[in-house]
Image (cartoon, rainbow, N blue to C red):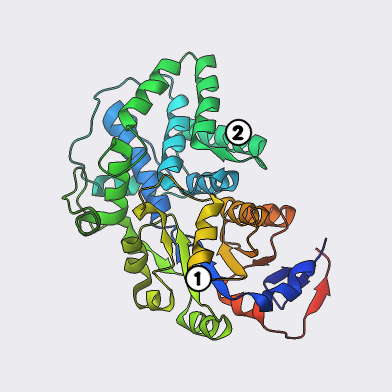
Amino acid sequence: MSYKLLGEGVLVLRDSYDEFPEVDSIAFDCDGTLIDASNSYYLATRLTTCIILKELYGFECKLGRDFDKTVKFLEMLGGFNNDWNKAAVMMQAIFLHLDDVKARKNKLEQIEIESYLEQVSDQESSPQIIKDALAWMKKTISENLGKFVTREDLEKILDEEAEKRGRLNQLRELREKLGPITRYGEGMLTTLYDEIYLGEQGVKAKYGRKPRYVSWNGAIEREKVLISGDTLRELQQLIPKGLVIITGRGRWEVEKTLGRLIDYFNLDASIFVADQREEREKPDPLLLIECARRMKSEKILYVGDSAEDLIMVKSAVEKGLDALFAGVLTNENALGFFVEKKAEAIMEDVNNLPRLFKREEALWKPF
């Protein structure tokens, strides 16, 4: 197996090189592909974890970029497209290592979030017990790489570890407090998380409610767009049936951050998982199959940055869809996974995507 190097920063699987000019539509993942969510979703995960542990258990901690790196590693298990699930397992892993904490209360009240921002600004997490928890998570993830692992799967592993430590009942009590990981308003974690991420105006716009716990401008304001208007214009000219989005986000959040760039996408054919009532999310291949049907696509390319993106495409191909995958290396753990699973293309920057569809002189190089 070898890859073709199309200039700096773009690799194409040799056997797939001639297929890219046949692509008639492109579907994009959002986080890590179209949008840099490192200062929004990851920040919301850190804040949610800090707040619940402090408010309910009196445990004060600092969570830094090493925490984010563990979350990014978690994303390579394929079953963590939903950020609520990431927050839930990270919080449980930390809680498991807190031997002396006891519940002070069972529910949250109004939170002054500004007082927590300093606790999530450090490069390194503290105290040492947090580092121990992160190391345990990394080890657990490493042992399960290559498998498809969900929150429920990891919670079974957490239960086994909690039983060894004599803390199984306490861990289950924490889960009860967090509430169902289903929708905004139905559980403590999901409600707090969305209020931190969306902000007061976002909660009102998306859910038609006033926030229950947090009133501020929202982590979403810190997002940056990764793809340029020039790239999207060029792709529109190259791809006959156009561009769409398949994302775990809701449409409101996507439009909020992309702004006028949203006009380059066929929104009627796009799929915004958070807005759907069905319990379906990536890597369910039916998402890509349905999108291709809406586009009347004969060969579709999906562009994403994590394990569930590639798994979705490979599963859709097994069901008969003519589809390719292009991986963007915004997750530092993704390269090895993409190579092992034979991603048809791998690139450092999403703005290099048009290069896949041009027959320019290229250099063969084994990989």
**Marked residue nearer the N-terminal end (2 or 1):** 2
- Which dot marks residue 140? 2
Element at badge 2? helix
> Relative to residue 328, is residue 186 depicted above or below?
above
The image quadrant where one finds the C terminus is: bottom right
Left or right: residue 16 versus residue 110 is right
Q: Residue at x 65, y 80 (%)?
A: 357
- Residue 28 seen anywhere in this rendered image of the structure: no
Task: Identify the mark at residue 156; answer none if there is no mark.
Answer: none
Q: Residue at x 47, y 69 (%)?
A: 244
- Mark 1 = which residue? 295
Distance (Cα) linking label 2 and label 1: 40 Å
On the image, the x and y values in percent for residue 86 come to 46, 42
In the displayed structure, 355 sits above or below 4; it is below
Q: Position of residue 88 (x, y in %)?
A: 42, 37
Residue 219 location (% of width, % of height): 32, 56
Question: Can residue 174 be seen at all in this image of the molecule?
Answer: yes
Packing grade of label 2 (10 A; few <14, some 14-19, many >=20) is some
357 sits to left or right of 222: right
Q: Residue at x 75, y 69 (%)?
A: 16
Q: State the residue in front, 315 or 139.
A: 315
> In the rendered structure, are the residues bearing label 2 and label 1 in contact, judged by CB atoms less than 8 Å apart?
no
- Depth check: give the residue in front, 355 or 65: 355
In the image, 283 versus 99, the foreground residue is: 283
Q: Is residue 128 above or below residue 331?
A: above
Q: Amino acid at mark 2?
A: Thr
